[in-house]
Amino acid sequence: MTEAVSADKMRRAAPAGQLIDHERSFIFTFDGKPVTAHPGDTIGSALARAGVQILSRSFKYHRPRGLRCCAGHCPNCLVQVGDEPNVRACLRAAQQDMVVEAQNAWPSLRRDALSLTALGDRFLPVGFYYKTFIRPRALWPAYEWVLRHAAGLGRVNADTAPATYDKQYLHADVAVVGGGPAGLSAALAAAQQGARVLLFDENGELGGHTRYKEIDRTAFGRDWGLEINDMQSPIPNLDIYTNTTVLGYYPHNYLAAVRGNRLFKIRAASVVVATGAYEQPLLFANNDLPGIMLGSGVQRLLHLYGVLPGSTAVVVTVNDDGWQVAHDLWRAGATVSAVVDLRSAAPTSQAAAFKEALEGAGARVFLDSTIVAAAGKGAVQEAIIAARGVRGGPTDGGSTRLPCDLIAVSGGWAAANELLYEAGAQIAYHESQGEFLPHALPPGIYAAGRVTGSHSLQSQIKEGREAGSAAAAYCATGKVQENFAHAGERREESAPSVEQDAHHSAIVTDGNGYENVRQGKRFVCFCEDVTDKDVRTAIAEGYRSIELLKRYSTISMGPCQGKMCSVNAILLCAHANGWSVAETGTTTARPPAKPVSLGVLAGQQMEPVKVTPVHDWHRQHGARMMVAGIWLRPEHYGDPTAEVQAVRQRVGLIDVSTLGKFRLTGPDAPQLLERLYVNRWQKLSPGRVRYGLMCNDEGVVLDDGVTACLEPQEYYMTTTSSGAEAVYEWIQWWAQSGWGDGVHVTPVSDVYAAFNLAGPQSRAVLSRLTPDDLSNDHFPYMHVRQMQIAGVPCRVLRIGFTGELSYEIHCPAGYGQFLWEALLEAGADHGISPFGVEAQRILRLEKAHIIVGQDTDALSDPFAAGLAWAVKLDKPAFLGRRSLARVSEQGPALRLAGFKMENGAPPPAEGLQIVQPEGDGALQIIGHVTSSRYSPTLQEAIGLCWLPAAMVVDGQPFTIRLDDGRLVQARVHEGAFYDPKGEKLRT
Amino acid sequence: MLILDCPNCGARNTQEFRYGGEYNPRPAEPDAADDAAWSSYLYMRHNRLGLQKEWWYHRAGCGLWFLAERDTGSDKVSRTYFWSREQIP
Amino acid sequence: MMAEKQTPIYDIARSQGAAFVDIGGWLVVDAFGGEQKSIPAMTRDVALLDRSARAKVLVDGAAASAVVERAWDVPHLAVNGGAVHAQGAVYRLRHDRYFLSAPPGLEATLESTTARAMRQEDGLLTITDVTHGQAELWLLGPAAAELLSRLCGLDFHPASFPNLTARESSVAKTAQLVIRCDAARQRAYAIVGARSLGAYLWQTIIEAAHDLNLLLCGEALLLALESSKERDAGS
């Protein structure tokens, strides 16, 4: 017979709560309804105080869920706060006017239509997506629509304004993770030894579990109290970061941590892990009802927030902790109707005193008993208890029904050892304690406190001090202290008073007896709604190993990532397979250990971009900027065709400051050039410029550019803009592995701005700004001169990428803006036009000049690319010679060729394939288009392409396949399209 | 993140460096090498599990190339040093 | 018209309200907003200055150490070490590379003084004026190290990074030379790197300092700091 429990959840004589300021209050809304909160409240604590029990609906079955752990470990309280989905209500501070909404429920939390999925659970067994909703195939789009809308948690708003994220690098001798008694002691001990210490704790204040569990501190004297309360870092070499969650451990003691919107990247010489433990749930029917909480969750609500989460409580425990929970509840004004202890022996020491007080207040005590089921509609109303010896039989035989509105479960502890796993600790299951504990740690890694299975405050403090000292000593000496007993090796009285296997056997009950009575689902994984029956089914289907079981059932793959279920899953897996826990093993812990938003990981937007000294001028004069590698360059200034015409007919000016530039000095500079380039350099005299082609030892073209000899032992080398860094690395590699004697290569790419003044009028324009003799006799093609232009010291190279008379002017970058404007001013009368990258592309294409990396690829050698003239096989050894000798003998299979389109066809897109139609209509690919433009000078479409060598004959027709499948005709054109003899260059 | 000990700058995050491949010395007389030997130099690597000598470039640092001896199984680097003519290849 | 020299920060600084002064032909920021800003004093204060006009010279060669020590009368330095002299400072970046730093206009002096100290037996020595090719941004004030540690993974603790230390590393994903060069009793760092990245670096530093008290400053601040230092010294 059940006693009706009053629906009135009055909170009488609620305790004060440490974090709460009861004097002030404010309002926020939950699903549109106003909720009162105080400063210090979380969303969860305020809702609990207001009597709201259902906070969410579970992922698969949409079962009502309420607060459980109050520590951010379980998925039950995930809510939507404004734009932000999946906020843990138990951790997020409540704020005035906050708009909080439930997730995963429609139309409302109370009446969620999708909770009907529970009725259809036959169709949603473990791994259902491999079994159901597949046939008939025609219905799949409908299934997909339904499932897609039913799946997922939370709502993302694509228009959310980006927040500010950033990061910070931190360095320490000793990094301590966890600010509870063990971590705090470790940090102080290490700091006192002079180490630089960083202490991280995810909560707003230090103390760990001592914040919400009342402990007897008198035994430890004033020191301990001082350490907790006065913590404002009394020691200068100790920095404390609260509200900071460590996410993961990476190689060489690198930690990632997050506080608010800031990601910390921490390098420490040693790490002390004092992360504590997660309280574990028990398995019983309907163990997921709202009103069923972890004992530590109840204590957090009571002591931190002053909320009494129920008026009539049943406490179930496997250890002494539950007795303290029951005692705390009773002192706060709740009726504790029963304490159910799974152990057979009565509790001792302090727990015995609690028992006496509770019995005195009328609580029933059940020893060697367990909870079989919970019952209630929407929230817990009844707990069903039975003695542990009883297996099977009808409900009434041997069980007791206890009306209640709160069940507190102290199911034992699982060490929070994610970081230790990631750091390479060896961790094993301790049968006696029922916990996975470390027994061997790599050098520099230390552990203390509950994460090593020590549940007494005295042990935690002592271990912390030892770990901190050892860590500091390790930093100083690099040696692991021999007398420091690693975690797991010293087991004094530090074990909790857990009877052998209590938690273990509580989980691994032979559930058959209870299945006879349809009392409800027993959830192992709350995140993914996986029951113990699902686990047994999966194993029966053959997914026996823990890795397969995890992936097939998705157990531990939800928001909690195993904090609430990994251990229980392993125990069930071992039991079902008949394996030991050691044989079963664990799955792999990976960062992040706690949830983190993608924004924090993305951090501050930092995308390096390079600009030339004339950048601002380009932008202000209508340039359309383009991204070229890491540079921003002007693509054109509005009309690239007009720019091409200006250069061909009059004069143009282009900013080529992006070119790579290197200074070569020393007596062996020519020799280095000889080795790196396929052309000859020894006889390049001062004042002369040569085009250089650089290959690797495969004979593949790497880069090209021009190099000028300014003086003996002084060379000025240029490379392509995109190749500058790679070429510098390449040259340095050879120079630093044997070819560097007698030569220095100094990068000066940014020291000089560079402009190309090109066109028939370029000489006339330049003459206006310099007193030097620019006549062809004094300054011929492929020569370099140093001169003053507009008063600026420059080096000028006469080269001809565009095919016109042109001067490439290099000046110290600081003068760049000034000189650019001076040149434009001097050219105004001549109709000068700035021109951009697009115009330059067209101009060089009209001359059939290649662009390395566009017209060549990772297989192109100079013979194939039409640059045989540059290769001097008869000169002494150079990079590529061995391979090129072979190519020269055999001839290349493919060759680069110029082409023109037939019948006024438009230029084909770059990259299109060249095909050979075969008899049956099939097409064989024989080449591709690399460069292609409409030439305003020739008034037809021209380009460069790769073709079989035999086809590279002037006039040879071939076929290009367009994207839409149409075939168009083109013809090979040998040599430059414009000024084939190169006369314009040499005037 | 791993740390690499640059012989010039000291211990730095590996992000500052660029891996330069397995140490693969160039034949002293390329023209004298037969096709098999030359092809082996160009395209074949030992890729052993165990101690490997390899190149690294400190691209966001001193800009120097150096050699490292790293166990490819454990990722432990036992030595970093500059190339020099005197060393055994 | 006399040719004027602009730093890579010139355009941004102008748009951010800077007033300029001519130093050795360079347009150098005097102050932002036309006034001299307050002196960085509070823990969260940091000043950002563009000092790219400063003279910068690289000395490369096996005998770089010997030549530099001779030329500038400075003690032998370990790699990453630095020393000041009458005209500026020298920093040893590598076994065979030195970086010479001085106020604007002194690059010719840096080159010639170093060259004069060369001897026949020194072998190949290359002296390169890179003044135009590098941006030089200074962070100065109590929060300078904190701001830098948002962008750079080096350890700025005084024990690891004492005054007059120069290290090349990654700052805001770009290769930079970071020099600690305390000035006027303020913690100060110079960040020296490719000119073409200067504008990006300036903006990125400003964004990274969103919750600090960042002061955009010019040479006027340094003059104010210097004179306050003299006053303190004299009092």
Image: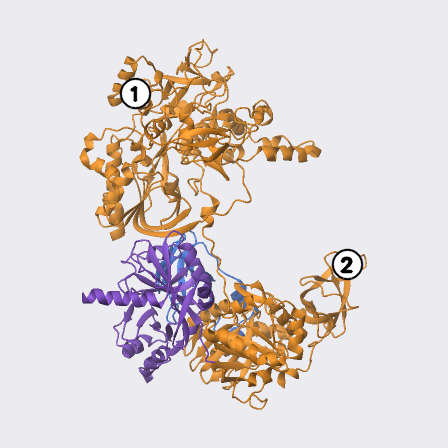
Chain colours: A orange, B blue, C purple
Drawn side of residue A312 relative to residue A547, left or right: left
Amino acid type, residue under disc 1 in the picture = Arg
Classify mark 1: residues with Cα within 10 Å, few (<14), some (14-19) or many (20+).
some
Relative image position of residue A207 (x, y in whole percent) = 29, 36
Q: Could you say which quadrant of the image residue B52 lies in?
A: bottom left
Residue at the location (34% across, 72% down)? C101
Relative image position of residue A560 (x, y in whole percent) = 45, 35
Res. A847 visible in picture: no
Drawn side of residue A310 relative to residue A754, left or right: left
Residue farthest front in this picture: C34
Relative to A312, does residue A16 appear above or below in the rendering? Answer: below
Residue farthest right in this picture: A919
Q: Which residue is mark 1?
A: A331
Residue A908, labelled with which disc? none
What element does badge 2 sit on? loop
Relative image position of residue A790 (x, y in whole percent) = 50, 82
Q: Which residue is mark 2?
A: A966
Q: Earlier in the sequence, mark 2 or mark 1?
A: 1
Query: Which quadrant is home to the C terminus of chain B?
Result: bottom left
Relative to A963, does residue A982 appear above or below in the rendering? Answer: below
Q: Are marks 2 and 1 in contact (CB under 8 Å)?
A: no
> Disc 2 sits on a residue from what chain?
A
Residue at the location (47% across, 54% down)? A605
Nearest-to-viewer mark from 2 and 1? 1
Classify mark 2: residues with Cα within 10 Å, few (<14), some (14-19) or many (20+).
few
Q: Nearer the viewer, residue A428 or C58?
A: C58
What element does badge 1 sit on? helix
Q: Nearer the viewer, residue A20 or A644?
A: A20
- Marks 2 and 1 sit apart, C-alpha to C-alpha, by 86 Å
